[in-house]
């Protein structure tokens, strides 16, 4: 079983409070990635939710994720948030995915959006095997996908336990496009998607770090989503000249144009009374 470390409760929670695990499939390199640990230290957990950290070291990604799922189910957890040690995320990632899951109980999984680790980077979102990356979406939208990367994804365990294990498997599929390698993460999403919807939160854009080269990959500025009005609040990664990653909050403007968080502040935030009026 994976190691389990309950998070400290700041308030006394009732015994029937929902339980969420934060699963860390560490591959022995995470200790060297300070950026990942800084993201994790700043992560805001959902309110009134029992939280525990689940750690699995020394296994390949697929077996590690299977072990983490087994541990979460054995501890009676309702949800599991997978966070890979080379994926970088804003402090609101867990809270945002949790809230969306409560608003969309039909979902088996909701993932953030991160890219491949090569240039030009492309989003690891897919509508089908052999179709290539899916680009046709607006910032802040919740979209249905066939599969995605599993580096920052919240999973409903009540649905996972209805799927026969192993849940994560690397396999080779054969179809009209010839032999296709289906990664363990895409295989997992496809299995869930046979029974329930799987969504991507396009308002949660992430960084993907190549530890060997110390390079952070983010969605390129020419991506279609940056050239159309956002459909909702979005957190977009920003790389400063030193290579440090941060996030900018983007919100829709009344006239349909982009309005970044700093611009919103400069324009004068409406007070609660003005918003109500």
Image (spheres, helix red, strand yellow):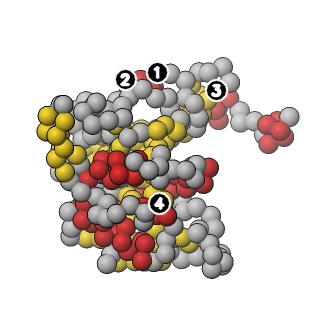
Residue position for label 2 = 222
Examine the rendered structure and indicate whether residue 155 appears above or below residue 117.
below
Residue position for label 3 = 253
Residue position for label 4 = 159
Q: CA distance from mark 3 to mark 2?
A: 21 Å
Q: Earlier in the sequence, mark 1 or mark 4?
A: 4
Viewer-proximal residue among 153 and 245: 153
Q: Would you identify the image quadrant in which residue 65 lies?
A: bottom left
Q: Identify the residue shown where x is 79% and y is 37%.
A: 275
Q: CA distance from mark 3 to mark 1?
A: 14 Å
In the displayed structure, does residue 12 sit left or right of residue 216? right
Q: CA distance from mark 4 to mark 2?
A: 37 Å
Examine the rendered structure and indicate whether residue 141 appears above or below residue 55.
above
Residues at discs 2 and 1 in contact (Cβ within 8 Å): yes
In the displayed structure, does residue 175 sit left or right of residue 186? left
Q: Earlier in the sequence, mark 3 or mark 4?
A: 4
In the displayed structure, does residue 169 sit left or right of residue 41? left
Residue position for label 1 = 227
- Circle 4: element type: helix
Place of residue 79 in the rendered image (x, y in percent of width and height, measured from the top left)? 49, 63
Q: Would you identify the image quadrant in which residue 119 lies?
A: top left
Place of residue 124 in the rendered image (x, y in percent of width and height, measured from the top left)? 33, 40
- Dot 2 alpha-carbon crowd within 10 angstroms: few under 14, some 14 to 19, many 20 or more: few
Place of residue 269 in the rendered image (x, y in percent of width and height, measured from the top left)? 71, 36
- Circle 3: element type: loop
């Amino acid at each position: 079983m994976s190691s389990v470390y309950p998070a400290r409760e700041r308030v006394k929670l009732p015994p029937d409070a929902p339980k969420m695990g934060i699963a860390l499939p560490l591959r022995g390199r995470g200790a060297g990635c300070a950026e990942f640990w800084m993201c994790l230290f700043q992560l805001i957990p959902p309110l009134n939710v029992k939280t525990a950290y689940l750690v699995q070291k020394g296994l390949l990604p697929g077996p590690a994720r299977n072990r983490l799922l087994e541990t979460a189910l054995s501890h009676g957890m309702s949800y599991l948030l997978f966070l890979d040690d080379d994926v970088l995320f804003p402090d609101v990632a867990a809270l945002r995915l949790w809230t969306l899951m409560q608003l969309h109980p039909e979902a088996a999984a909701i993932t953030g959006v991160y890219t491949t680790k090569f240039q030009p980077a492309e989003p690891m979102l897919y509508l089908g095997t052999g179709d290539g990356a899916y680009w046709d979406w607006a910032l802040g939208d919740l979209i249905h996908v066939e599969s995605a990367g599993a580096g920052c994804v919240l999973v409903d365990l009540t649905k996972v336990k209805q799927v026969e294990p192993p849940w994560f498997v690397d396999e080779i599929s054969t179809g009209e496009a010839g032999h296709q390698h289906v990664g363990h993460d895409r295989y997992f999403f496809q299995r869930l998607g046979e029974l329930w919807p799987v969504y991507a939160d396009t308002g949660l854009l992430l960084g993907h770090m190549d530890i060997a080269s110390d390079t952070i990959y983010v969605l390129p500025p020419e991506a279609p989503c940056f050239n159309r009005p956002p459909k909702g609040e979005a957190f977009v990664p920003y790389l400063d000249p030193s290579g440090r990653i941060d996030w900018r909050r983007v919100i829709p403007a009344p006239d349909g144009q982009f309005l970044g968080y700093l611009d919103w502040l400069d324009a004068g935030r409406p007070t609660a009374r003005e918003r109500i009026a």
